Amino acid sequence: MLELKDLQKTLVAPSGQSRTLAHKLNLSVNAGEVVAVLGPSGSGKSTLLKIIAGLEAPDSGQVLFGGVDLARTPTHRRGFALMFQDFALFPHLDVLGNVAFGLMEQRVNASQARQRAFDMLQVVGLAALTAQKVWTLSGGEQQRVALARALITQPRLLLLDEPFSALDTHLRSHLREEFSRRIESAGIATVLVTHDAQEARTMAARGFQLDDGRLTNLW
């Protein structure tokens, strides 16, 4: 289970003005549960994900997983998968290599990693593009590669920032259902950041609004 306890984060602009992104913020996410965080642009949703991932440090407070404080645990040792809006794909690798990368890092046999990556690409409808360089893909195709890469390692925690925004309506619906099913069956705790309230309600057991550094329960 993910637990955020009394997180505090204030951003100070070059002008000297400060903005509170998290004010004594508390949240818990159980295994197999999707929790959605909604809010206007600039409200701190992406920063919250970065704090959970270990990419940014809070000013105070704790991030715990399974009761263990992660303050001294670097990002690559947390066992979390992140998907941010810029996708962060590896331009020197083809589609299959991008998806298989996390498995190779876990020392999965190369042929097995590539087969599992191919199977996941079938799920997201990209099996025909395995040899393509990712920079030749459309935005929607790159987003699907990033989704496949995020899910394939069966992480302890999944952090999703607007994961379906570049996809058409039919594909968005299909992948929401597929992800929800896999998240539940694998017992992956998931934090979903989105502007789409309908998407949040479709996927998330609980939803919160982030505004002025505070979370308000929506459902």
Image: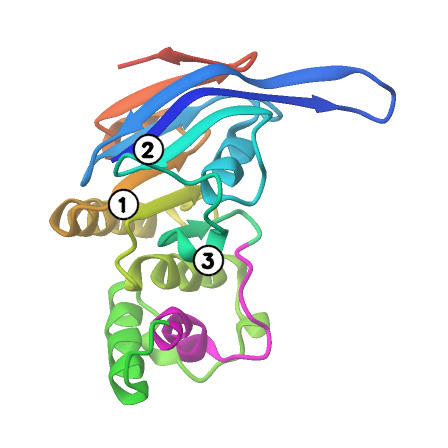
* Residue beneath disc 3: 76
In what element is the residue under mark 3? helix
Task: Point out the stretch of residues depicted in magenta.
Answer: 87-105
Taking the spot 26% from the left edge, 58% from the top edge, the residue there is 154
**Residue 143: horizontal and vertical position, in percent?**
46, 57
- Contact (CB < 8 A) between labels 1 and 2? yes
- Counting residues from the start of the chain, the first of labels 1 and 3 encountered is 3
Quadrant location of the C terminus?
top left
In the figure, residue 36 lies in which quadrant? Answer: top left
Q: Could you tell me the amino acid type at mark 2?
A: Glu
31 vs 118: above or below: above
Marks 2 and 3, how far apart in space?
Answer: 29 Å
Quadrant location of the N terminus?
top left
Q: Nearer the viewer, residue 203 or 46?
A: 46
**Residue 216: horizontal and vertical position, in percent?**
39, 10
78 vs 218: above or below: below
Taking the spot 79% from the left edge, 24% from the top edge, the residue there is 13
- The image's mark for residue 125 is none
Graded by Cα atoms within 10 Å as few (under 14), some (14 to 19) or many (20 or more), the crowding at tag 3 reads: few
Q: Residue furthest right?
A: 15
**Residue 85: horizontal and vertical position, in percent?**
54, 47
Left or right for 44, reference 182: right
Residue 102 falls inside the magenta stretch:
yes
- Counting residues from the start of the chain, the first of labels 2 and 3 encountered is 3
Marks 1 and 2, how far apart in space?
Answer: 8 Å
* Residue beneath disc 1: 176
- The image's mark for residue 199 is 2
53 vs 146: above or below: above
